[in-house]
Amino acid sequence: MFKKYFITFVISFLITTSIAQAKQKPPFLILGGIPHYTMTIKQNWDNKELNLTKEQKAELLKIRKDTISGIVSAKKKIAALKSQVLKKIEMKTELKEFDTILNKIASHKIEATKLHLSCVYRTKKVLNKKQLEVIDSL
């Protein structure tokens, strides 16, 4: 009886920990190297050297909102799938039964990476050459 409660506790703990960690980690396939322009811009919103116009700010906010909402959605889906993997590990599931879940996780990571890349390219279209140089130097 104790063993059953202990195993249930451990599984619950692992799932909770996995979900908490998934929320903190970026869900991208490529970690590092791809710039986070909208975050840098947000931190330098009123930078005189960057000199963003009202129109640019409006467009950049839209890009950031679109990107963040997509990333948050992907992270939630990945966290749920990771918890399924942890449950299956505890149930001693056959390795081949992980394929579908792992493919779904990979698919969400691909989408998140595409969103990140789209964010970079959309942001580059909004900024002029001088502003891009300023962002790259920050």
Image: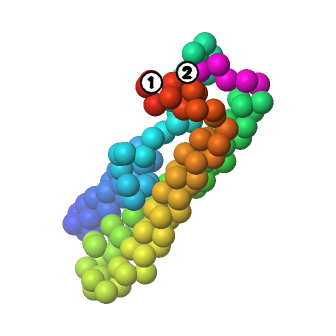
In the rendered structure, the answer to whether residue 72 lies left or right of residue 7 reads: right
Which residue is found at the position 27% from the left and 72% from the top? 90
Distance from disc 1 to disc 2, alpha carbons, whole Å, reads 9 Å
Is the N terminus in the top left, top right, bottom left or bottom right quadrant? bottom left
**Residue that numbered label 1 is attached to:** 138
Q: Nearer the viewer, residue 97 or 124?
A: 124
**Residue that numbered label 2 is attached to:** 44
SS majority, magenta: loop
Say what secondary structure mark 2 lies in: loop
In the rendered structure, the answer to whether residue 4 lies left or right of residue 135 reads: left
Which residue is found at the position 36% from the left and 70% from the top? 85
Seen as rendered, the residue at the extreme top is: 48
Residue 9 visible, this orientation: no
Is the C terminus in the top left, top right, bottom left or bottom right quadrant? top left
Are the residues at dot 1 and dot 2 in contact (C-beta closer than 8 Å)? Answer: yes
Which residue is found at the position 32% from the left and 62% from the top? 11
Mark closest to the chain's N terminus, 1 or 2: 2
Q: Which segment did they paint magenta?
A: 50-54
Question: Where is 95 relative to 76, above or below?
Answer: below
Residue 3 x/y as whole percent: 22, 66
In the rendered structure, the answer to whether residue 94 lies left or right of residue 30 reads: left
Counting other residues with Cα less than 10 Å from the Cα at mark 2, is it few (<14), some (14-19), or many (20 or more)? some
Q: Amino acid at mark 2?
A: Asn
Residue 15 x/y as whole percent: 37, 58
Which residue is found at the position 55% from the left and 45% from the top? 120
Q: Nearer the viewer, residue 85 or 62?
A: 62
